[in-house]
């Protein structure tokens, strides 16, 4: 879990994914000579996104690098990045030109105003994120930003044995997207790939549980082509991969952004479930992390 811990500690809210891109690039360059296949690295002219191309790809996986957080406005007031949980007392960290920042979030129930308790005015436009606090035991991992550092972790572990496929690390998923539209054009037009998986984190609900396996989402706010979803289910069934089915009417991911492009991608969201979503205490079962990686390895062989 040391790699996941490092990923969770990186300051990379939406719009500031560059630090995550730099970490991944350094990691890939250090590790890839020991991988089964060495990827072509596509890092230029796609802003802060990153694409790894292995062999002769038939399938791509998208994993967003950004997290939720806050932007400092005026007089230490905050605006949300994405949809973070708001609770007075949460510890936030960041940095402006004056120095490192550690402060406490304040929420006014009457005015609904979000601000921070700090001993000076923080520079406008400074981003703040939940303070790092990575914990684990024999069964669970508990941390800020499991969403979606676990998706990134899954892709980097997948890369160790991947022979044919594309790994696309995207930006802005938590705050309106923008990079999937660019990446889909590159992947479809240059590499002729139109099958995709979305490596992201979903919710523990009344029908999805900790420790019951990775989640295959049949739909959320968006509805992917169901014949593709059932093809994936059939592959998982034959391999006896432990999984759960999700059916939701809200929420979205890079899959929704992909569906709205001009390119005919089939896509399926597959990820581990967590509770404490978008809080400093996101919680995921280690067994679900394992089954997530297992199904990705299988699907890159079979699809």
Image (cartoon, rainbow, N blue to C red):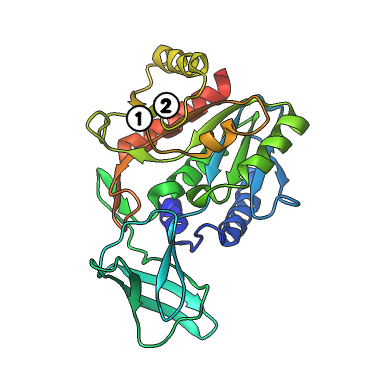
Near-viewer residue (218 or 61): 218
Q: Which of marks 2 and 1 precedes in the sequence?
A: 2
Identify the secondary structure beneath mark 2.
Answer: strand
Badge 1 crowding class, 10 Å Cα cut-off, few under 14, some 14 to 19, many 20 or more, is some
User: Is any part of residue 256 visible from this angle?
Assistant: yes
Q: Residue furthest front?
A: 111
Which mark, by number, is residue 219?
2
Residue 285 in view (yes/no): no
Q: Rounded to the nearest whole Å, what is the CA distance between mark 1 and mark 2?
A: 6 Å
77 with respect to 161 (left or right): left
Q: Residue at the spot x=60%, y=49% of the render?
A: 31
Quadrant of the drawing holding the C terminus: top right
* Residue at x 44%, y 12% (from the top left corner): 234
The x and y percentages for residue 45 are: 75, 51
In the image, which disc is placed on residue 248? 1
Q: Residue at x 48, y 37 (%)?
A: 199
Marks 1 and 2 in Cβ contact (< 8 Å): yes
Depth order, front residue of 187/157: 187
Residue at figure coordinates x 48%, y 45% from the top left: 153
Residue 28 to residue 220: above or below? below
Q: Is residue 110 above or below residue 82?
A: below
At mark 1, the secondary structure is: loop
Q: Up-down: is 91 above or below 247?
A: below
Image coordinates of residue 271 in percent, x first then y, are 41, 35
Position of residue 50 measured from the top left corner of the image (x, y, whole percent): 65, 48
In the image, taking residue 151 as reference, residue 114 lies left or right, namely left
Q: Which mark is residue 133?
A: none
Please tell me how crowded label 2 is: few (under 14), some (14-19), or many (20+) other residues with Cα within 10 Å: many
Q: Residue 241: horizontal and vertical position, in percent?
A: 38, 21
Q: How many marks?
A: 2
């Amino acid at each position: 879990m040391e790699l996941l811990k490092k990923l969770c500690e990186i300051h990379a809210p939406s719009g500031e994914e560059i630090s995550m891109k730099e970490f991944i690039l350094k990691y890939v360059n250090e590790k890839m000579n020991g991988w089964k296949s060495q990827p072509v690295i596509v890092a230029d002219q796609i802003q802060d996104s990153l694409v790894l191309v292995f062999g002769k790809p038939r399938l791509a996986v998208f994993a967003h690098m950004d997290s939720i957080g806050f932007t400092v406005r005026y007089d230490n007031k905050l605006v949300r990045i994405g949809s973070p949980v708001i609770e007075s007392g949460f510890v936030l960290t960041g940095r402006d030109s004056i120095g490192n920042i550690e402060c406490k979030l304040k929420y006014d129930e009457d005015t609904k105003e979000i601000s921070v308790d700090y001993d000076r005015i923080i520079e406008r436009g400074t981003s703040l994120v939940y303070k790092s606090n990575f914990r684990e035991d024999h069964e669970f991992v508990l941390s800020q930003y499991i969403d979606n550092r676990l998706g990134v972790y899954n892709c980097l572990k997948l890369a160790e044995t991947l022979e044919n496929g594309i790994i696309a690390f995207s930006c802005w998923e938590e705050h309106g997207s923008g990079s999937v539209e660019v990446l889909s054009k590159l992947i479809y037009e240059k590499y002729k790939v139109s099958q995709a998986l979305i490596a992201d984190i979903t919710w523990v609900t009344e029908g999805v549980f900790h420790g019951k396996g990775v989640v295959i989402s049949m739909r959320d706010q968006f509805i992917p082509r169901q014949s593709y979803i059932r093809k994936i289910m059939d592959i998982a069934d034959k391999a006896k991969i432990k999984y759960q089915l999700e059916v939701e009417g809200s929420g979205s991911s890079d899959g929704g952004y992909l569906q709205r492009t001009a390119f005919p991608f089939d896509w399926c969201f597959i990820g581990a479930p967590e509770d404490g979503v978008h809080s400093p205490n996101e919680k995921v079962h280690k067994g679900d992390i394992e089954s997530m990686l297992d199904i990705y390895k299988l699907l890159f062989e079979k699809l």
